[in-house]
Image (cartoon, rainbow, N blue to C red):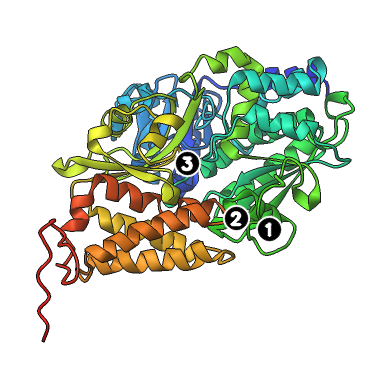
Amino acid sequence: MILHDLLQIKETELAGRKKITLRCCMAAGCMSSDSKGVKQQLENAVTAAGLQDEVEVRGVGCMKLCCEGPLVQADPQRALYVKVTPENAPAIIAGLKGDAANLPQTDPDAAFFKHQLGIVLANSGVIDPERIESYIAADGYQALHEVLNEATPKDAVETMVKSGLRGRGGAGFPTGLKWGTVAKSSGAKKYVICNADEGDPGAFMDRSVLESDPHCVLEGMAIAAYAVGADQGFIYVRAEYPLAISRLQIAIKQAKQYGLLGAGIFESPFNFNVDLRIGAGAFVCGEETALMASVEGKRGTPRPRPPFPAESGLWGCPTLINNVETFANVPPIYRKGAEWFASIGTEKSKGTKVFALAGNIKNTGLIEVPMGTPLRTIVQEMGGGAPGGAQIKAVQTGGPSGGCIPAQHLDTPVDYESLTKLGSIMGSGGMIVMDDRTNMVDVARFFMEFCMDESCGKCIPCRAGTVQMHNLLDKILKRQATQRDLAKLEELCDMVKNTSLCGLGQTAPNPTLSTLRFFRNEYAELLQPDKYGPRANGEAKPEVVAK
């Protein structure tokens, strides 16, 4: 394929568009509520009304407001129908002809949508994820063509450095620095890996991107491979994401057919292939060295670093590992420029961040906001606050590796440094809201139980420490613990955090530590007086009378 072919595909696709488009969400959440049946009945209703030449029914990816699915939007009318059933199809078609569709709708200009800025999710809910032509019509693969024909690998790395993009997998490591390290590493063979092993409870950001816009991830991986000198890529995705896997398989096949993957891409010397590796769902395989072990067919356990994957990774070769959202940012950066991307966000946290907004909140779904957006804007305005008249008590960011941020800190800007100061992390993008009916000790126990179950058991601090911390939290909740048990819990948190081998163990104490920091009174209320030490309320210990 050459540039002329790419532009011809785009022109043909746009010329074939019809006067009215009905976009029907076909992401996993809406499909679980029979959006497939909705789409089929919409197509039937269009035929019955004789509007085949005027109306296109398009299956699209996530339309973001997941709590109101299935969602259907009519363009250019912009009517956004919620909780649509197959039986609603005739009324929606009647609404296109001017008859009022007496169906539940929501305002497409409401705060939930107004505060969003789509970079990663720009095509989500707009294009058909199973048609490469739909992606190309949205300027897809133009960035890859420009990089291959107008930039050297060194130029490509420098663009990423200038953009200020930081890895969206959780640690926030500068992407350009990581690319540069792999590019400089010597080795006849190099690899690029997309980490799609999203395992945080309540998180569905990466899944939604793969279901909604798989080609943006493939294009981002190809640009990264050119920059670092790799010719083979792997996408490591968990088996619990069958729809994402299916759409990735379709996308890879289509890209190969069009010559956008494989040998001589855009008639250049650059070759790049992508294969899928399906993970069994072990949370620890989100850690890059455990992930690589799993790709190699070994048990998914982490190894000490250094050496880092950038120098010695998959099969001992230099390996670049970024997550789904990081790769999805790549094509827009090269299409619109590093300066454009760097102008969004804060001084040290550039661009936008995708979050899965869930928990005790009115509007749950997928959001993408500029870095630095206050938590209050996300939770109160976009999320609509807690339902049933309750008050927001805390927001959990970063999943099992993160922390609970109390309501008094809702004006905190969402960026890497600000969240770290509060004992939490950005993480991959899970954001769980809790109201004033939530027991924070119970929250700490839930996340500790998750880490305990998901520990690979390789190192003793994590293997044994998480069990002991979970037992102590359980003891506190059963009102059987004393102040000494609480002190032991804090001691264990410090030990596990500082001595575990990998990120799972090192961050497992975070939810407990953050709840102890901001909600210590809830622990104290559950403690029993200690006969041999200070009481929970600070009173002097009783005299021990010898028998």
Could you tell me if residue 186 is visible in this image? yes
Residue 415 image position (x, y, % from top left)? 43, 29
Q: Secondary structure at mark 3?
A: loop
Res. 294 mark: 1
Given residues 69 and 487, the one toward you in this image is 487
* 446 to 345, vertically: above or below: below
Real-space Cα separation, disc 3 to disc 1, in angstroms? 22 Å
Q: Which residue is found at the position 34% from the left and 57% from the top?
A: 490
Real-space Cα separation, disc 2 to disc 1, in angstroms? 7 Å
Q: Are marks 2 and 1 in contact (CB under 8 Å)?
A: yes
Please state which amino acid type lies under the numbered disc 2: Cys
Residue 421 image position (x, y, % from top left)? 38, 34
Please state which amino acid type lies under the numbered disc 3: Gly
Q: Secondary structure at mark 1?
A: helix
Q: Tell me where residue 383 sits by quadrant.
A: top left
Q: Tell me where residue 445 sits by quadrant.
A: bottom left
Q: Are marks 3 and 2 in contact (CB under 8 Å)?
A: no
Q: Which residue was labeled with disc 3? A: 427
In which quadrant will I find the C terminus? bottom left
Q: Which residue is found at the position 33% from the left and 56% from the top?
A: 444
Q: Are marks 3 and 1 in contact (CB under 8 Å)?
A: no
Single out the residue that lies furthest toward the front: 546
Please state which amino acid type lies under the numbered disc 1: Ser
Q: Earlier in the sequence, mark 3 or mark 2?
A: 2
Given residues 381 and 60, the one toward you in this image is 381
* 163 to 529, vertically: above or below: above
Real-space Cα separation, disc 3 to disc 2, in angstroms? 15 Å
Residue 320 vs residue 482: left or right?
A: right
Residue 221 vs residue 272: left or right?
A: left
Res. 285 mark: 2
Q: Earlier in the sequence, mark 2 or mark 1?
A: 2
Residue 479 image position (x, y, % from top left)? 19, 68
